[in-house]
Image (spheres, rainbow, N blue to C red):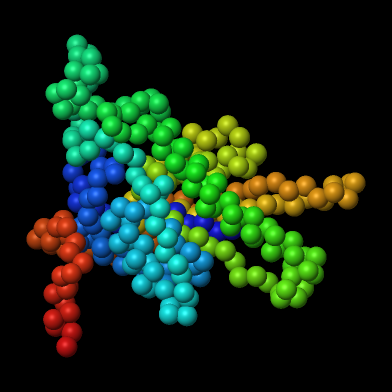
Amino acid sequence: MVKITFVRHGESVDNLKDVWAGSKDSPLTNHGMRQAEHLALSFSSLPITAIYASNLGRAQLTAKAILAAQPPTNKVPLHTSELLQEQCFGAAEGKSYKEKRNEKMTTAEHYARGIFPTVYNRNERFPGGESKNDVAARARRFLDEVLMPYVWQEDVEKNADESGSSDDGPGLPKKPIHIVIVSHGLFIPELVALLAMKDEKMAGKEADVRTNVRGMRNTAWTRVEFGFKRTEEANATVEKTLRIRFTHVNVSPHLEKLQRQKGGIARLAHDPAQKDIRTFFAR
């Protein structure tokens, strides 16, 4: 089975505001960077095959923190993909999501006045933005183009080992495949739900999966094991079916002892070029 860990980025400046924060490149806060560093430390002894991250800065810094904490002997590639971006809210980016809908106004009138009430229809989108189904379409591309090749690779290698045709010889275990995906709070549930729907036993539970994965804390993670299960039929044929197993959902043990800095420093945008003041006292 391929192990896949879905990580939400660290706290961003816009996460602290009551605004639509999607594809706008809002930077990590100082606290968000510390969250990423604590996460990275907790992952430092975890074998990772590859890291895939959204191209937005908050996800990139989180992914780079994970990469930096890996031992030098583990040459982990970091891939960037626009497919992993957060939902784009178009004209609503940076606008308040707390504005209530006025029943006497049309949707167009709301938008003309810079009012962007919450939308609940999966096909509805703000001007210039994406709907939930648009986000799911991107997630499907990532699943088919990036994740499924790893699943096929793992299945081929497992079959070769069992048949004794592996170049490494029979019985020698392959290095497990573990993919880490650093993305966003609205995108991750769409991708996880699509992955789960590959398992026929999860049929009809797509909305439930999205609901259970939604609401991940900053740098919290969800992990699944996903791959082919082989069953041998009476006529000696081998049936292959895709199966998913959730091992962790929205967990963040690395944050248990992390406290916010006082005096408003934690809320400020993290500057990668600025040294932590503690480094000046560590000489």
Residue that lies at the very extreme toward the top in this rendered image? 104
Q: Position of residue 51 (x, y in %)?
A: 44, 62
Is 85 left or right of 233, judged from the image as shown?
left
- The residue depicted at 41 percent of the width and 47 percent of the height is 83
Q: Quadrant of the N terminus?
A: bottom right
Q: Position of residue 16 (x, y in %)?
A: 20, 47
Q: Nearer the viewer, residue 258 or 156?
A: 156
Q: Quadrant of the C terminus?
A: bottom left
Residue that lies at the very extreme toward the bottom in this rendered image? 283
Residue 122's place in the image compared with 199, above or below, is above
Q: Position of residue 271 (x, y in %)?
A: 17, 64
Residue 139's place in the image compared with 109, above or below, is below
Is 268 left or right of 1, judged from the image as shown?
left
Q: Position of residue 103 (x, y in %)?
A: 22, 13
Residue 164's place in the image compared with 240, above or below, is below
Quarter of the image holding residue 27? bottom left
Q: Nearer the viewer, residue 112 or 232?
A: 112
- The residue depicted at 90 percent of the width and 46 percent of the height is 235
Residue 229 in sight from this viewpoint: yes
Q: Nearer the viewer, residue 34 or 52?
A: 52
Is 38 left or right of 12, judged from the image as shown?
right
- The residue depicted at 39 percent of the width and 69 percent of the height is 67
- The residue depicted at 24 percent of the width and 50 percent of the height is 25
Quarter of the image holding residue 36? bottom left
Residue that lies at the very extreme toward the right in this rendered image? 235
Residue 220 in sight from this viewpoint: no
